[in-house]
Amino acid sequence: MPQSADRQPFARQWLYIYTVEFDVCPFRRNGMVIPKWQRGRLFVRGRLVVEEVRDPDLHRMVRVGHIFDADRTDLLLPLYDVLLVSCKPDWWTFTGYERQPSTYSTDQVCYQQSWVLIPATITDAERAKSRLPPPLPPVSAPTA
């Protein structure tokens, strides 16, 4: 179907009205749950973008979640068929699957993945609190 002169093909552009950065921790590696004691060092900080795109492999529209840095490069593998599982004031949980290149063939392998997202402002406030010295004990009034 030919396109009219006034109608241009869709070009992807993102407009950030406000940006919220998240500290994101993936919960799985190659589909296996990462032990709790290893998760603390896996956090990455970036911007969350969830969009709906056409997937040529599945022949349907899928929701894809990305974590981008300031240059709009992916910090983690994209999360396909992303679903918001939990949304609390302190953290969000997303689940879906990620695609990785297969080591045995040219195909891709899909692994289940979950992300925990903590707004960076909360993380920075917690870090700032931990660096502050403990509060002084209350001063009692002198007795006469």
Image (tube, grey):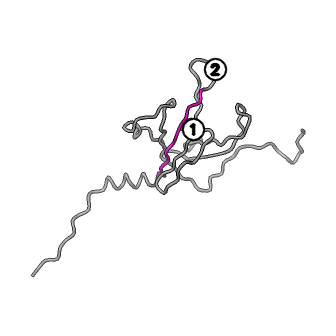
Residue 124: image location, x then y, percent: 42, 52
- Mark whose residue sits in front, 2 or 1: 2
Q: Label 2 is placed on what type of residue?
A: Thr
Q: Which mark is residue 74?
A: 1
Tell which of 120 and 70 is nearer to you: 120
Q: Main secondary structure of the magenta part?
A: strand
Give, as a single range, the part of the protein colored magenta. 109-120
Q: Are marks 2 and 1 in contact (CB under 8 Å)?
A: no
> Could you tell me which secondary element the residue under label 2 belongs to?
loop
Crowding at dot 1, Cα within 10 Å, few <14 / some 14-19 / many 20+, comes out as some
| Image quarter in which the N terminus is found | top right
Q: Quadrant of residue 136?
A: bottom left
> Could you tell me which secondary element the residue under label 1 belongs to?
loop
Q: Quadrant of residue 76?
A: top right
- Was residue 103 drawn as part of the magenta stretch in this picture? no
Describe residue 90's horizontal placement relative to residue 135 as left or right.
right
Q: Quadrant of residue 109?
A: top right
Q: Earlier in the sequence, mark 2 or mark 1?
A: 1
Residue 81: image location, x then y, percent: 63, 40
Q: Is residue 80 above or below residue 17?
A: above
**Outermost residue toward the top in this view:** 104
* Residue in view at x 89 percent, y 44 percent: 4
* Residue in view at x 46 percent, y 34 percent: 33
Tell which of 58 and 42 is nearer to you: 58
Q: Is residue 112 above or below residue 102?
A: below
The residue singled out by tag 2 in the image is: 106
Tell which of 6 and 47 is nearer to you: 47
